[in-house]
Image: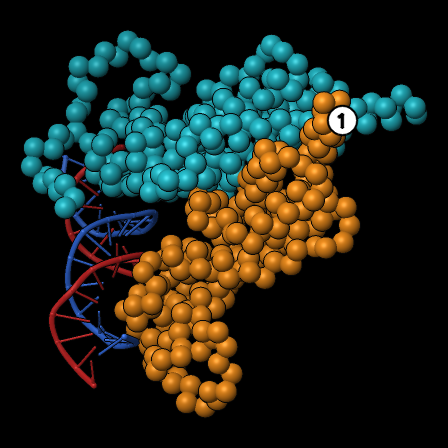
Chain colours: A orange, B cyan, C red, D blue
Amino acid sequence: MAARRKATGRPRRRRKQDDQATRVGPSAAPANGSALSDREIVRGARELVAEVGVDGLTMRRLSTKLGVALGATYHHVPTKRDLLLLVAHDLYGEVVVPKKGTWDQRIKKLMVDVADMVSRYPGLAAFMSANADDSMPVELRRAVTEILANAGFGRRDINAVRAALFFYLTGMSSGSVTPASTRALTSVDIHRLFEDGLDILLAGARVRLEASQRGKRSR
Amino acid sequence: MAARRKATGRPRRRRKQDDQATRVGPSAAPANGSALSDREIVRGARELVAEVGVDGLTMRRLSTKLGVALGATYHHVPTKRDLLLLVAHDLYGEVVVPKKGTWDQRIKKLMVDVADMVSRYPGLAAFMSANADDSMPVELRRAVTEILANAGFGRRDINAVRAALFFYLTGMSSGSVTPASTRALTSVDIHRLFEDGLDILLAGARVRLEASQRGKRSR
DNA sequence: ACCTGAACACCGTTCAAGT
DNA sequence: ACCTGAACACCGTTCAAGT
């Protein structure tokens, strides 16, 4: 039977009266007198997704976690979809772009890091691939583009390789949302498979690069 | 305002009393006296997914379309997830494996065909990548494996290439579930991008194949 | 056995009413 | 302006009751 908690004793709104107003970063604190900040909501949502997945994240559940009524959350965020977009963006903001190594080593490390990160937020990869237009994060996009451009890829090849990498990434990390499927592949298997496929993809990109350089030389 | 149809005049169950009992294929007809066959349900669900997508497919909506009560559908199919699995399997049963051309031409044609097919069922690719353990159809898996084996790929490379292709396929076709995103990429762009990425992936696979053959020769 | 239709326990979203 | 809490229009799933 599922744990059923009564509303009794549930902590109500903490007014964070003991929060020093010293650290007021760029929109870090509410800035106005409002008790609930957008940042607070996104952080709460992100934690919730990590714990219970995208499907488990409920506007009601989030509101309870934040200690406010349902309407309060909706006052700050128009829709669950927008909220998840904010979460995804928040996440990708933390991606570190590798600076050392050859172009393919850098791409590989970047992709593996992103895959590891995203895999800790069940259902988010699936959501993102379904909303690719808006949530393919600019930071990641720019990072990949830069690495490929520096390696000597032409504009068209950059687009193709970048798209292939992104599709591969989301296709891979969309899997195993259901915790029920324990029997299939271990996470070690998946990780190995992911790297193997990445190597194949990058080998293909290398062929493309060499072909275009050969073409340039003989032109 | 959304169209709101009253229950008035909605066609109730057709008992198909005018159905000749002549054509009784392998479980084609109910066989027993039951009015609702599993096949009928899957076909109805498939049509519904084509029309309104996976999210638009509702157990209630499907029941209405079939002319039965909600409980009747649930009597045949335990869960919406299982229903979608059946739909996916039904779909993949129609995949034609290309017989002509080099191994990479055959793989490419197969993948493009599957992508085209799946793209006509919005949300199904996303569902499948989230349920990959159960819905990666055996037919497709076997087809890819056979083509690669005939081309001379080793067992491990077959696994890697097959997985890469499948992840790429689902990652790609999970996109654009929301009809709202009209502004981004046209379907022509997507198609071109898909083929481009496929070429890169297959070029990488070719490198792998040549490397293993070189290794074999010098051994 | 097969089916009906109501009920249960949820959702996302809206909104009048309060402060 | 910001928040509350009830309400609306749905879901998937279950189940006593009918035939």
Q: Is residue B128 above or below residue B214?
A: below
Q: Is residue B77 above or below residue A20?
A: above
Front residue of A199 and A205: A205
The percent position of residue A78, horizontal first and vertical second, equals 31, 60
The percent position of residue B168, horizontal first and vertical second, equals 57, 35
- Local packing at callout 1 (Cα closer than 10 Å; few below 14, some 14-19, many 20+) is few
Q: Residue at x 23, y 31 (%)?
A: B66
Subunit bearing disc 1:
A
Q: Please tell me in which quadrant of the rendered image residue A118 appears.
A: bottom right
Check disc 1 and report the residue beneath it.
Answer: A217
For numbered disc 1, what is the local secondary structure? Answer: helix
Which quadrant of the rendered structure holds the N terminus of chain A?
bottom left
Q: Residue at x 59, y 40 (%)?
A: A162
Dot 1 amino acid type: Arg
Q: Residue at x 21, y 38 (%)?
A: B69
Q: Is residue B214 above or below residue B171?
A: above
Front residue of A24 and B164: A24
Q: Residue at x 38, y 54 (%)?
A: A81
Outermost residue, right side: B219
Q: Please tell me in which quadrant of the rendered image residue A175 appears.
A: top right
| Left or right: B58 in relation to A28 | left
The percent position of residue B204, horizontal first and vertical second, equals 70, 30
| Left or right: A172 in relation to A196 | left
Whether residue A18 is visible to the viewer of this picture, yes or no, is yes
Which quadrant of the rendered structure holds the C terminus of chain A?
top right
Front residue of B160 and B181: B181
The percent position of residue C11, horizontal first and vertical second, equals 32, 58
Q: Please tell me in which quadrant of the rendered image residue B19 appears.
A: top left
Whether residue B153 is visible to the viewer of this picture, yes or no, is no
Number of marks present in the image shown: 1
Outermost residue, left side: B8
Outermost residue, front side: A219
